[in-house]
Amino acid sequence: MIVLGKKSVRYITIIATTFSILWLLSFGWAIQNYYAGASNNEIKKQVNPKTIENKDQAFTIVALGDSLTRGTGDDSGKGYVGYVIDDLKQRFNGHVIVHNLAINGQVSSQLKEQVKQQNIQRQLAFADTIFLTIGANDLFQQGRTLENFDSAAIKIIKQNFIDNMRIIFADIRKVNSDAPIFFVGLYNPFFEADHTGVTSPTVHDWNRTAEDMSSSDPRIVFVPTFDIFQLFVNDYLYSDKFHPNQQGYRLIANRISPFIKWEGEGK
């Protein structure tokens, strides 16, 4: 048996502690570097293998945005996302997965931060198609913007929205360069209540700017909705006179569903 003196024990303890600290620092640096430089493929490697298996067997949709994507106003709770899913399940024999990540009341600056989250990026990386509604809360601000109409203020709001959307689309494309993005445009819920005639031109201009911005990516599909509500707006609005009702959401879904294709269709 070898008996170590107190000095030897102290030296060994110091050496062991030093190596432990160096190992921890190296490990921490490696983890930080890994996540800071995570690419599309690296993000995918972090996903549970079961998700990868489902990816080969199912059509995956990620839905982002505000209360329209949540389906607020539809008594069935489905919203346009749910009606599109119903149609796709028939066409794709039930092989559809949806992750609805929309948040009621969300504005573009909040969505910009949401898509930077790693768990959101993981889901976006495996999306076959992405749904997106955003901008109504930026522009309307629960009706305050158009009640106190100020064209200069709206111009600033619109520019901030476009700047946010460019970042949002860029961050989505960092993790998924292929999935079509269905970007739903705005309608005018205040059409019949607007006696000054300023709301419709304002919404039209907003939509034109958003469509022009999104056209830089050929796989972003701008989905117009203004005309759906224009002539019979009260027929398609919920009792809050802002969100679509069940019929309104169905009409939006009918705009989107025919454009979605999948190589696994019919299997």
Image: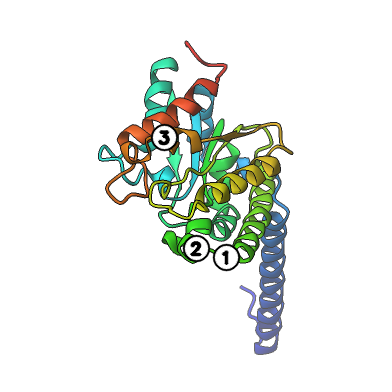
Q: Quadrant of the N terminus?
A: bottom right
Q: Quadrant of residue 159?
A: bottom right
- What's the residue type where badge 1 is placed? Asp
Frontmost residue, 86 versus 232: 232
Residue type at numbered disc 2: Thr
Disc 1 is placed on an element classified as loop
- Identify the residue position indicated by label 2 in the image: 145
Please tell me how many numbered marks the rendered image carries: 3
Q: Is the residue marked by circle 1 packed among few (<14), some (14-19), or many (20+) residues within 10 Å?
A: few
- The tag earlier along the polypeptide, 2 or 1, is 2
Q: Earlier in the sequence, mark 2 or mark 3?
A: 2
| Residue at x 70% of width, y 37% of height | 215
Determine whether the residue tagged by mark 3 lies in a helix, strand or loop: loop
The image quadrant of residue 122 is top right
Residue 231, labelled with which disc?
3
User: Which mark, by number, is residue 150?
Assistant: 1
Q: Amino acid at mark 3?
A: Leu
Mark 2–mark 1 CB contact (< 8 Å): yes
